[in-house]
Image (spheres, rainbow, N blue to C red):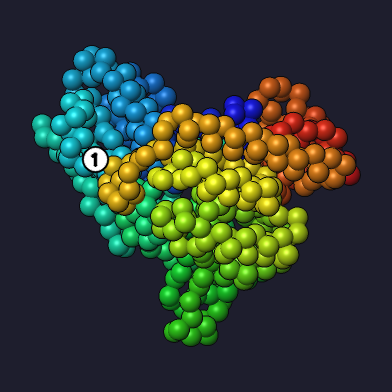
Amino acid sequence: MMDLVIPDKTHDESRQGEALVLEPAAGKNNGRKLYIESYGCAMNFSDSEIVASILAEQGFETTADHNLADVIFINTCSIRENAEQRVRNRLKEFTVAKVKNPGLVVGVLGCMAERLKSKFLEEEKLVDVVVGPDAYRNLPELIDQVDSGQKAVNVLLSREETYADISPVRLNSNGINAFVSIMRGCDNMCSFCVVPFTRGRERSRDPKSIVAECTDLFNKGYREVTLLGQNVDSYKWKQPQPALSKGEGSDEPNAEEVLSFGEDLGESETTNFANLLELVALINPDLRVRFSTSHPKDITDDVLYTINQYENICNYIHLPVQSGNSRILEMMNRTYDREWYINRIDAIRRIIPDCAVSTDVITGFCSETDEEHHDTVTMMDYVKYDFAYMFKYSERPGTLAAKRYADDIPEEIKQKRLAQIVAKQQEYSFYRMQARIGKVEKVLIEGYSKKSDKDYCGRSDQNAMVIFPVGDNYKPGEYVNVLIEKTTSATLIGKVVE
């Protein structure tokens, strides 16, 4: 399983526990240092950028050494049990720092904080602050509260908070790729998932703020944005929205010029995800656009046609299936069945023939039979996914499944089914990679390969990692055409061609 490196940015294992380091804000140093590390999905890492921006305005400087910190925050994930255990183990490691510095403030942010709320203060005596995903603006006041000798909790969920007005700092960025949050929360209520309870109801950002943020990133040299949401296809903004136009007399778009057109759209105009994709793609053809995550019940043909229309919208869709069996999908409350999912896959293949598709799979869900598991296997045979995230079912307290169904599949059967799914995906990942041999891929150079400074690495349009020799005529942040000569199950290897 370890060989199956998933080139998708929704949950990058190499970044788990990553600590951020920022340039100090000029003239705002308050003498206190912040250490913040993140776990979980890309939304959590994006949220850490928001937290860092809020505290930088208060004069905090960041440090990569928690032993030097005055405030330690862990931005947490509650999706799987092992993610929570990882955080608890990490908190124990901070005990020594707390003993050396009794004034140290230790806080837990994010989904785990929201799920456990004030109970966390009782369970983890080390923790001073517990803050949910919608309360980050309140962090300076909460830190002041701890400084005065009190514990602090704010896990109130909001129906309005999108942090649209906060320009996030970019954590440990390569200056090329950036995440842009387009919405927060989730309304889907999948029975296995805690996200609706930890991140609240779904709400979308004003597209003006999204376009302005992406425009600013492009003007600063970024060449790829990934639009983030728990379910991007349900993005919807019900306000009159402008069309895009490039600023005259300049090669670079200006956010105000970009947003100054389209006043005649009318009061009833709604911006949906297909519209938003187009708005971002029109910023500049050299700005590559990705997004995550789609939901099979919501992804429309309009979205697919928009992807196909613009060369800079990547031909890659992450479309979680979870199970290939309709009864299990109904128990999961996924609101689609096997036939609907196949219909969406067929639409992708018809409208975007060269589109890569990745997925999520859960094995051993409550009451799943061998025959129902086999339906998931045959779904993988039908789609032949490029990549997949694969897990055995782990009951999460507070979810609908935990309340309604018995977690009755023995661990050894879960593991056996997972192993079969992983082996199947290994086969199809290699199959998809092999099909790229002899083709020329447009690659955005991200930096040096992890294994050698003689090779560059970057991602193809289909989100596959590509390795190729360093050259004098190109550098990170530029696009090159790479002829693919060989592959592993996870990486394309080739050379730059004109």
Q: Around disc 1, counting alpha carbons within 10 Å, would you say few (fewer than 14), some (14 to 19), or many (20 or more)?
A: some
In the figure, 235 relative to 195: above or below?
A: below
Residue at the spot x=27%, y=49% of the render? 403
Foreground residue, 329 or 195?
329
Relative side of 250 to 472, left or right:
left
Expressed as whole percent of the image width and height from the top left, the position of residue 406 reads 32, 44
Label 1 sits on what residue type? Leu
| Residue 246 image point, x, y percent | 64, 67
- Image point (75%, 55%), residue name: 354
Q: Is residue 101 above or below residue 217?
A: above
Where the N terminus falls, by quadrant? top right
The answer to whether 277 appears left or right of 62 in the picture is right
Q: Nearer the viewer, residue 49 or 492?
A: 492
Q: Residue at x 33, y 60 (%)?
A: 201
* Residue 347 spot, x, y in % from top left: 67, 65
Taking the spot 18% from the left edge, 33% from the top edge, the residue there is 121
Q: Quadrant of the C terminus?
A: top right
Residue identified by numbered label 1: 116
Q: Nearer the viewer, residue 122 or 172?
A: 122
Nearer-the-camera pick, 28 or 490: 490
Residue 248 appears anywhere in the view: yes
Report if residue 198 is visible in the image: no
In the depicted structure, whether residue 28 falls above or below residue 86: below
Across and down, in percent, residue 219 comes to 60, 53
